[in-house]
Image (cartoon, rainbow, N blue to C red):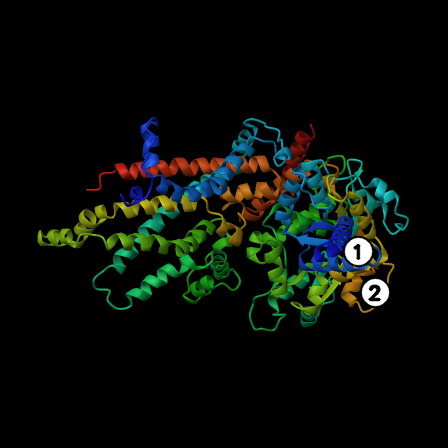
Amino acid sequence: MAVTASIPMTQPTALPAWAREMWRYRVLYLFVLPFAALVVVFGLWPIAQSLVLSFASSATAFRLNPDYVGLENFETIFSDRRFIASLNVTLFYTAISVVLNVAFALGYAVLLSSRYLKRGNTFFRLAVFLPVITPDVAGFIVWKWMYNQNFGAVNAALGSLGLPLFGGIADSDTVLSALVVAELWKHVGFYTIIFLTNMQLLDPALDEAAELEGATAWQRFWYVTLPQLRPAITINVVFALIQFLKTFTVVVVMTKGGPNFSTNFISYYAFQKFEQASYGEAMAMASTLFGLVLVLTYALYWALERTDWR
Amino acid sequence: MQLKKWLPAAGAAFLVSTASAAYAETLVVWHDLGDNGVNWFNELNELYQKENPDITIESVSFPTDQWFGKVIAAINTDSAPDLIYNNYERVIRIQNQTDKVMDLSDAFASIEDKAFLSDADIGVATYEDRMIILPIQRVQMGFGARTSWLEAVGEPFPETWEDVLRVSQKFQEEDPDGNGQADTFGIAIEAANPRDLIHMLDLYTFGTGLRHTLLDPDGQVVINQPRHKEVLIEVMKLFTDYKYVAPDSVNHSFAEMYQVIEGGRAGMFRVGDWNVKKWDAEAITGDFTIGSWPKFAEGDTNAVVIGGMRGVAVPENAPNKDASLAFAKFMLTKEAQAASLNNVGAAVRGDFEMEGLSPNRLFFAKPEHNLNAYDFPESINPAYPEIEAEYHARLLDAIDNPPDDWSAYVESLAADLQALADEKKS
């Protein structure tokens, strides 16, 4: 009412219902329009351009009138065994990272919200959130040094404990786990904060009632707390899925896609193709990744929303 | 009255100012040489303005990957800079992507003072019968070793591959930096990207006097020829058998390799002519000796490698084409070349005063060693980068899963690469 009260009331009657609705709230639309315009110009337009260029030949991709080659770039990348390997390792890494990050964040949030953690609560919250606001490159450079085979802290600690040394990012058998840990450190604080926020909205009466009925702590968590955390779980899983499917910075800083292409995720492979002036293939890879993110995100969101959490 | 009095004067002043503004030109150069390059072009601007006071030279440096994208996009959308400056093989890519890099043959023919350029220099500048760059800076790369480390382990500068292996062993076992820790490696190397590991192979291959790393001009794979095979296997064994390089080297590109060199973790390394000025003043502070690359066999010849040619190119749609061509030709004059050597550490002529240069800088500026140039395969085989990328991928796999029989592995790899080269040729 406050919005409509200050505007002229002469409403065109010949318009269809949706247009009359928009007319009625036109001031509201005027306020949101600039942001939407920015999204179109800086978000949707580049996406549309890259989709178009994925059908262009590399040699002419940046000309005013590129030569279009149909699906040739997509045929090329899907017949490239390294792209298939890249696709597989991206999906595998994403699956592992999403599960670990969300599970770890949930566990940490439960611990932080415990009524018994009275001292140092702020410190522990800060400790888990600080990596989120640390610049990506700086954080990953430190991890790279920690994994260094020559003077890294990880192997120094393992060696002093008499444990076998860790191959870290120099060994194709261990590099994925090394990156999973580094990225867990980097991102888990964000997911933890979302869980903590959701936990502050839980109804304590439900937990108390279950306790009075004789439910164990595990049963109360599983049947009372967890279903109430559904919004946070959904948003965290979706965020994490998007985050890890697009993994790029950690690879650029720490592994350059190696050793032996074992961390050659799609984003990085597309970037390398771009650097080699294979613009059409690079755009086809980027478009494939974009499609993958869209489909998987929607599918996961749909599945999580339909799940019976009780 | 007052207005009437001043109006003609103001009009005249306006006409004079617009006329001189129309005459004055600013030439913009896009390069990737960083601060050294910006300083060089600033000095060139001062020198050029002595004879051409109405022309100003402005340079902009981009990281190499951004340079590619910006140049290609600008040329293809008719917003090109006046001049572009980079390595010849990068300009070839620009030409392939735009078809708008000017043929400089006529401009080159009109230069009288050019006897200092060899046929090889001119050959590199030519692509598909067009002279796409004027060659300005020859890129030389030698083999370097930490002087104090050699003294600490009682070794002279390594001349042969056997020397390199022996010195590497000592650098790793005898604590040459005296810090009480086993934290040093024999050799700095890079292997992350296709150009990294192959670049290292190029240096050891050309440094021992061979002429091709992967393909000869007829498109035949050479890696299984006896001398080439030995170089390839020995360099690969640095990673797998000898372990004279840092284990992390498989993830190292140029930046990481420089950290290993400048951080004092490896005793032998590549020295480019552009590295010397910095390494004389800081990082290594002059504690390095430069020489030719080691030879692998008795009959081989040690050489310093000419690894490329940087040059200036003019887009067909440059805003001030005539002025750009005139400035491009100026870059080959003595004074411009002296400025190039002073700022970037490289030039194509050396017939000027070089007093005050350190011995390390004179090593490249007044070469008294064998020089062996790259075969520049990109200029004759458009599919070369693709074949090279496959070669690199297979080598990375061999580092990760070392074969029991290296010789058989190289034969098999050569057959696969030949099939790929033939397929691309057809």
Q: Which residue is mark 1?
A: B347
What is the chain letter for disc 2? B
Q: Where is residue B417 shown, x and y percent of the image?
A: 65, 36
| In the rendered image, the vertical position of residue B160 relative to residue B405, given as above or below | below
Q: Where is residue A154 shown, x and y percent of the image?
A: 45, 62
Quarter of the image containing the C terminus of chain A? top left
Quarter of the image containing the N terminus of chain A? top left
Q: Is residue A7 left or right of residue B336?
A: left
Q: Where is residue B152 shown, x and y percent of the image?
A: 67, 72
Front-most of residues A299 and B251: A299
Q: Is residue A127 left or right of residue B178?
A: left
| In the rendered image, the vertical position of residue A122 relative to residue B402, given as above or below | below
Residue drawn at the location 63% of the way across and 45% of the way down? B70
How many numbered marks have been drawn onto this rendered protein structure? 2
Question: Considering the numbered disc 2 on the image, is that residue within a helix, a strand or a loop?
Answer: loop
Residue type (three-letter) at the residue carrying disc 1: Ala
Residue type (three-letter) at the residue carrying disc 2: Met
Residue B300 in view here: no
Q: Which residue is mark 2?
A: B354
Question: Considering the numbered disc 1 on the image, is that residue within a helix, a strand or a loop?
Answer: loop
Residue A233 in view here: yes
Sequence-wise first label, 1 or 2: 1
Front-most of residues A166 and A249: A249
What is the chain letter for disc 1? B
Residue drawn at the location 61% of the way across and 48% of the way down? B66
Residue drawn at the location 41% of the way across and 56% of the way down? A186
